[in-house]
Amino acid sequence: MFRRITRLSRKALLALINGHDRTRYPIIRQPRLRPQRGRVLLSYLEAPLLWRERSPQFKGHSNKRASREIADAFLELGYEVHAVDWADLNFVPDMDYEVVFDIAYNLARFAEMVDCKTMKLLHRTGSDPYYQNAAERHRIEEVNRRRSGEYAVRRASAYPELERASLQVADFCLVLGNEHTLRTYPEEERGKIMLAPVIASERGRTVKSPVAFVPEKRQFLWFFGGGAVHKGLDLVLEAFSRNPQVTIHIVGDAVKEPDFVQMYENELFRSPNIHCYGNLDPSGSEFREILRDVFCFVAPSCSEGMSPAVATCLQIGLYPIISRDTGVSLLEGAGTYLEALTVEDVERSVMEVREKTHMELSSEIAALQTYALEQFTRQSFRRSVREFLARALC
């Protein structure tokens, strides 16, 4: 039987949070509501269930907040939550569960191990895995052809067949994304899918006021995590290298990808109009300093559920040049969609946006920031999760 977490020493708790102690696993949280409604096996991120509400560990990617919100929703409904890591393909449940909730591979496995009456719920944080893999493969083939390189796959699903199987066995599915994201999934499965907004990353004091929306220098930003080609950094670097009069700041993990650096070393480190920083905290002072001269971000991602990076930049108060595959719906008449993931389309969009009037930019940014600050929040995600569970567990 699973051990229940009672009182841990500080040393033991830190070891568990940092992933060094698997003896108290899965993490179990008890609901306040009595009598209990049942047990939930939650396959997402387990450590955030132990963190304090204001813990600095919640900074960075918002999936940590999302996993905590989902657990809290079950607790409020009276379920005991047993949380395991979503990538743990070896965990075998040894007790009965009324609900199994997973984000990727495990639901298909667990479906064979639990009672046939167990409610099976899936939460997808990306586009359909086969769509995602095809999109990344195409982008990698393109960049390797243009640059005679050997860039390797970074963001492809390792087990698309398991993810598809999880969707097929799921009773209901909650997808981060918009209607474009939904259309990447098989038509026959869309009836069980409900859409939800992403939670933007914590921003601290980086949110711009209207007077700072359009700085005089009108510089640009690319802001993403891993998978430089998946996120379109190759297109951005080539577009800006053709236009040395326009400056862009590159914030992300591209410098950790040796094959990408080998192909784009000159653009990353020797171009006076391209500044590369590595990964930065979006709520930190260094990132805030960069944003002083930035008015626009460029996000040519080839596949997302709904991009937290895009949501964060919109909340900060930056003008968007984004692909439709970021999963973010812009307000009509505000922002720019890339209609093709090509160097030429990125270049054309950047130059057109740069020539917009101060009034046009300020108006569009203000509308999008207001929308984003309302839409991409913990509260909005929480409401979607509760609506989803009400539909599934009624």
Image: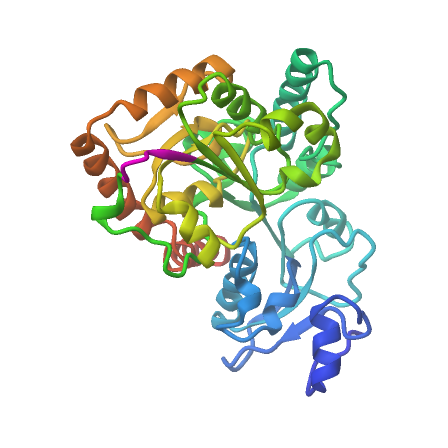
Question: Going by the image, does 81 lie left or right of 151?
Answer: left
Q: Residue at x 62, y 28 (%)?
A: 229
Check the image and report above or below for 290 versus 393.
Answer: above
Closest to the observer, 387 or 212: 212
Instruction: Please report the residue visible at 55 percent of the width from the left and 54 percent of the height from the top.
Output: 63
The N terminus sits in image quarter: bottom right
Residue 182 at x, y = what percent? 48, 32
Between 170 and 347, the one nearer to me in the picture = 347
In the picture as drawn, the residue positioned furthest to the left comes out as: 359
Assess whether residue 319 is covered by the magenta stretch. no
Q: Nearer the viewer, residue 110 or 103?
A: 103
Residue 106 in percent (x, y) is at 72, 49
Residue drawn where x is 35% and y is 48% of the image: 315
Residue 364: percent from the left, percent from the top? 23, 35
Q: Residue at x 38, y 24 (%)?
A: 337
Classified by dominant secondary structure, the portion drawn in magenta counts as loop
- When asked about the image quadrant of residue 52, the answer is bottom right
- The vertical placement of 360 against 104, above or below, is above
| Side of 319 relative to 96 (left or right) | left
**Residue 351 in sight in this render:** yes
Q: Which residues are magenta?
A: 215-220
- Magenta segment includes 216: yes
Q: Is residue 283 visible?
A: no
Residue 389: x and y in percent read: 48, 57
